[in-house]
Image: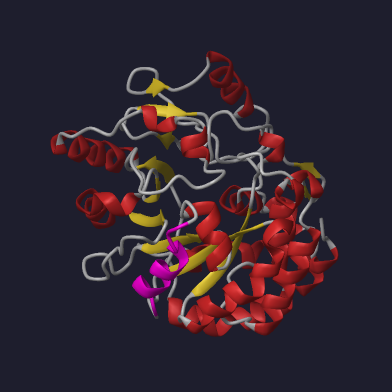
Amino acid sequence: MGAGRFVPITLDLTHTCQLRCEGCYFFSEQLDDVRSPSDEAVFDDFVRRERARGTNFVTVIGGEPSLQLGRLGKLHDNFRCITVTNGLRKIPYDGFETMAVAVSVWGDHELDRQLRGGGKLDVFARALKHYKNDPRVTFYFTVSNGNVDDIASTVEQIVANGNLVAFNFYEDRAGLGGDFDQAGGYARALTEIYQMIDRHPEHVLTTAYTASTASGRDLLGLTWGHDTCPVISSGYSAEKDRWYGSQAWLEKNLERIHNGQPYYPGHRAIMPDLESVRRCAVGEDSDCSKCHNAYARNVWIMLNRELHSRSKQDFTNWLTTAWTFALGACAVDVNRGRTLLPEVHERTRAARHGAH
């Protein structure tokens, strides 16, 4: 499969995880109450159904996907996948050669231990050891103004480890407050991200344009929210699926797909039981206007191609977003892609004026 048209789903592969990270929507919203089936035949049937639907790209989340390596291997054999992992258990290279691996990190060792390791476990150190010089791997650093002082040191270690780094933006679901509250914006974090781009352009996957868009609420006249988010569950079938959550959200999603804004037809956020579908890829109860999920924002840019046809710079911003997304998904040659990243960053430098 090349970097052609994506027909995606989001899948919670399992309801279990070794961690309880501060601010993780999956556990803060008790989504682990929906359990994954123990019967392997049920999972095999799910894979067959998705292939029949035309699905060709799976974002694997949870729970912790590395705890289900057998099922993860079946997904790898049948779809292009990007798997989001905490890094505590290594996803082997053999048998998973073309699987993109997105390793979460929330700060340098001390802060990452505090937010994700229960104050004791150095999750970041484990992940660095497991994925040294692994071409499949991008470390996704979740930033806020509260961990801005950790950005440079964390990026330096990822670069020295031979991996790519991208940036997500922390949503304060745990109520930490202060500089961790997204209501204060991400201006300090953005300034540091731009410095990391200048220092390590061949290792930073996030462009100035994608960072500016993900950290704010605007896109060329559009305002972010449920009415514009493209990663809603739009492929729900009352005959084949269970709707998880309120009837009100089902009705809102149905209204959303008819409002003229682009979305992925057929995309579903599928929960661990392989039958229940929740409203979107990034949770069930969150306030959409406060969501800064980088995956959702990248897709927002990519599906608004016509909006980016107004000028050469707008189209450049769109094209580089689609290309870096494909690079992070291992859908284009990773080694060749790294050599092109400095030029990509130079061509998107103009977006740096949009600090939020």
* Residue 233 picture location, percent across and down: 50, 32
Whether residue 83 sits left or right of residue 165 in the image: it is left
Q: Main secondary structure of the magenta part?
A: helix
Residues 311 and 322: in front is: 322
257 to 186, vertically: above or below: above
Q: Residue at x 39, y 55 (%)?
A: 83
288 to 250, vertically: above or below: below
Residue 121: name its quadrant: bottom left
115 to 339, vertically: above or below: above
Residue 272 can be seen, yes or no? yes
Q: Residue at x 47, y 38 (%)?
A: 26
Residue 204 can be seen, yes or no? no
* Residue 304 picture location, percent across and down: 67, 49
Magenta-highlighted residues: 120-132
Q: Residue at x 39, y 65 (%)?
A: 2
Residues 277 and 115: in front is: 115
43 to 301, vertically: above or below: above
